[in-house]
Image (cartoon, rainbow, N blue to C red):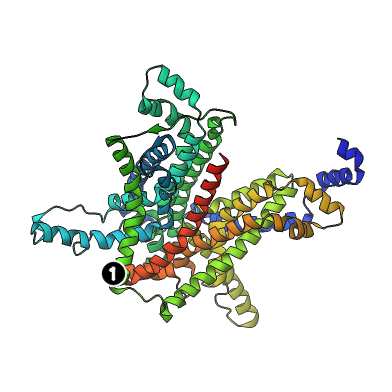
């Protein structure tokens, strides 16, 4: 109040901002961009109103039961697996002390660097009849044929689900660990006073308090599992993602593919609703700054060995073993890193990733700044909903992008044919523009989340001071916000860059003809059973994928130091 009296100009500036909010052109631009990003998802959802085609009727009577059964098994196995590994490992590294327990805090994050389709390709070679494992077993025990011994069949939904669990459990681990760190010793003291041991207190006290965070992590892991395409396609497992691809390109029925995509979209939206509900309930697990933290239990003997194995096995199975398998395959017959062909695919990947990073960060700044200035709830809601694409599988995004772009190209071509007698062909479909549009829909949430968090750290009084000195909204962003947002912008661009580099289904479906990226090349080589050659590109993708993991490790280290 005193500041307002001492500085009437500043008070007037604030009153003006409250009255006018965001500039009209900024609101219009934000609305158009958010609507454009939502267009593919709305296009997919609109297929519900289309009549069922003969292809869809055939799919409903033949493979739809398999799709539903495989989806149910996938959700069950990945849900139970990621929650078990993530919760147990998070509890051990936060509440127990055993050999290398501090190192496991960040080692357990490493599987995040490996996309699901790459771990599938790696284990396909390692577990095959002619692979290293079975060959060694036959040599060791003198077996000569598959009839002499039993070996589990991984070419089914159960095997694929286990592999995906190995790279998706970190989602649960991260959130569960954060929830355990926030819990105080008071509840544990009460449970111990009532006669409960450490593990009983974990089951009766810590686990219920962390349940919202665990549910949110499981929901994220399940969304990633449902979005997987490369692993399912390679292992011949029928899921909605593979069915969408085959229906569109194999049967040529866009309507049926869009209707399948809508079914998967509905399932994903249910998971999003559950995750948001869990996140909303998570506020009840917070504690005050002065609360006493629960003491760490020092494990010895066989308990320490079991704790070490419980943390080491997921890291080995989810990161160390796949990387070693890929290195072995590359040394046997991989593409040379310095070959012209490898660098052509790498250049395509890097170019797309760089353009996508710049585009998405720019759009994120636009949306975040508009919501910072505007007090209109509809605009805020529209921006929030437009970031839903990250939870939508890449195949669904691809179908949603191709449908409106194809309609636009056909409309323009029809007008030019009637008016000038000239065919314009495909202007947007099958171009780099279409690929970048798919990336915008798919990964906008990543860039927006980081940029919005950066804006929240900047006091609004700095905006007022800049406007009072004559800066326009664009000048405030360029001269005031941009230097302060540098860390957030770099983080957003880097994570988008890496995610685009790893993205497979959207790139595979939307990319221009004869324009392959490293991810597409790895998929094609693996589909042709040339896993040794595919290992080179896979290693390059994993190497780049470690970058955001290192950022997470740095954030955890800073958090531990502050704590």
Report how many numbered discs are placed on residues in the image.
Answer: 1
In the rendered view, does 432 fall on the left or right side of 133? right
Q: Nearer the viewer, residue 29 or 107?
A: 107
Among all residues in the image, which is located at the extreme top?
Answer: 194
Residue at (53% x, 33% y) in the render: 281
Q: Position of residue 451 (x, y in %)?
A: 64, 53
Q: Taking 447 as reference, is 22 left or right?
A: right
556, 136: nearer the viewer: 556
Packing grade of label 1 (10 A; few <14, some 14-19, many >=20) is some
What residue did someone put label 1 on? 529
Q: Is residue 104 above or below residue 249?
A: above
Q: Quadrant of residue 354?
A: bottom right
Q: Position of residue 349 (x, y in %)?
A: 49, 70
Q: Residue at x 55, y 77 (%)?
A: 425
Residue drawn at x 45%, y 71% is: 517
User: In x, y percent, where is residue 288?
Assistant: 59, 30
Residue 156 rendering spot, x and y as whole percentages: 27, 54
For the question of whether residue 31 can be seen, the reply is no
Q: Quadrant of the C terminus?
A: top right
Q: Which quarter of the rendering shows the N terminus?
A: top right
Please tell me whether mark 1 sits on a helix, a strand or a loop.
loop
Q: Is residue 194 left or right of residue 269?
A: left
Q: Nearer the viewer, residue 224 or 84?
A: 84
Q: Is residue 135 visible?
A: yes
- Residue 247 falls left or right of residue 373: left
Vertical position of residue 186 compared to residue 556: above or below: above
């Amino acid at each position: 109040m005193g500041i307002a009296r001492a500085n009437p100009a500043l008070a007037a500036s604030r009153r003006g901002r409250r009255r006018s909010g965001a500039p009209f052109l900024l609101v219009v631009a934000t609305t158009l961009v958010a609507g454009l990003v939502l267009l593919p998802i709305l296009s997919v959802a609109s297929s519900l109103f289309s009549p069922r085609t003969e292809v869809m009727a055939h799919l409903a009577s033949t493979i739809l039961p398999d799709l539903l059964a495989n989806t149910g098994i996938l959700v069950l196995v990945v849900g139970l697996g990621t929650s078990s590994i993530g919760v147990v490992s998070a509890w051990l590294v936060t509440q127990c002390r055993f050999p290398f327990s501090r190192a496991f805090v960040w080692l357990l994050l490493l599987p995040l660097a490996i996309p699901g389709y790459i771990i599938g390709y790696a284990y396909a070679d390692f577990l095959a009849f002619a692979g290293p494992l079975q060959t060694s077993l036959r040599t060791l025990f003198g077996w000569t044929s598959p009839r002499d011994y039993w070996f589990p069949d991984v070419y089914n939904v159960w095997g694929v689900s286990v592999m995906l669990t190995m790279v998706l459990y970190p989602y649960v681990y991260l959130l569960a660990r954060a929830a355990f760190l926030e819990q105080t010793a008071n509840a544990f003291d009460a449970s111990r006073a009532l006669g409960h041991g450490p593990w009983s207190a974990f089951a009766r006290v810590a686990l219920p308090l962390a349940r919202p965070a665990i549910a949110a992590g499981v929901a994220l892991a399940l969304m990633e599992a449902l979005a997987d395409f490369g692993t399912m396609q390679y292992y011949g497992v029928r899921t909605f993602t593979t069915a969408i691809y085959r229906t569109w390109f194999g049967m040529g029925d866009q309507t049926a593919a869009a209707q399948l995509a809508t079914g998967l979209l509905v399932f994903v939206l249910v998971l999003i609703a559950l995750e948001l509900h869990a996140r909303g309930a998570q506020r009840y697990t917070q504690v005050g700054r002065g609360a006493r933290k629960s003491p760490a239990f020092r494990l010895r003997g066989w308990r320490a060995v079991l704790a070490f194995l419980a943390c080491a096995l997921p890291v080995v199975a989810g990161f160390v073993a796949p990387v070693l398998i890929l290195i072995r395959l590359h040394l046997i017959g991989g593409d040379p890193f310095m070959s012209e062909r490898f660098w052509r695919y790498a250049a395509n990947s890097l170019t797309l990733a760089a353009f996508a990073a710049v585009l998405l960060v720019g759009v994120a700044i636009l949306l975040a700044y508009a919501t910072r200035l505007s007090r209109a709830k509809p605009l805020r809601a529209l921006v929030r909903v437009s970031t839903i694409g990250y939870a939508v599988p890449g195949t669904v995004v691809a179908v949603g992008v191709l449908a409106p772009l194809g309609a636009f190209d056909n409309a323009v071509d029809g007008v030019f044919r009637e008016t000038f007698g000239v065919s314009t062909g495909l202007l947007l479909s099958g171009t780099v523009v279409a690929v970048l549009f798919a990336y915008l829909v798919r990964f906008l949430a990543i860039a927006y989340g980081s940029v919005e968090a950066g804006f929240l750290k900047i006091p609004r009084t700095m905006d007022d001071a800049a406007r009072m000195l004559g800066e326009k909204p664009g000048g405030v962003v360029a001269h005031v916000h941009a230097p302060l947002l540098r860390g957030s912008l770099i983080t957003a661009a880097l994570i988008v860059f890496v995610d685009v580099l790893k993205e497979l289904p959207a790139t595979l479906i939307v990319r221009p003809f004869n324009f392959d990226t490293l991810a597409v090349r790895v998929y094609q080589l693996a589909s042709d059973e040339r896993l040794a050659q595919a290992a080179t590109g896979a290693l390059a993708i994993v190497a780049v994928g470690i970058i955001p993991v290192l950022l997470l490790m740095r954030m955890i280290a800073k958090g531990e130091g502050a704590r």
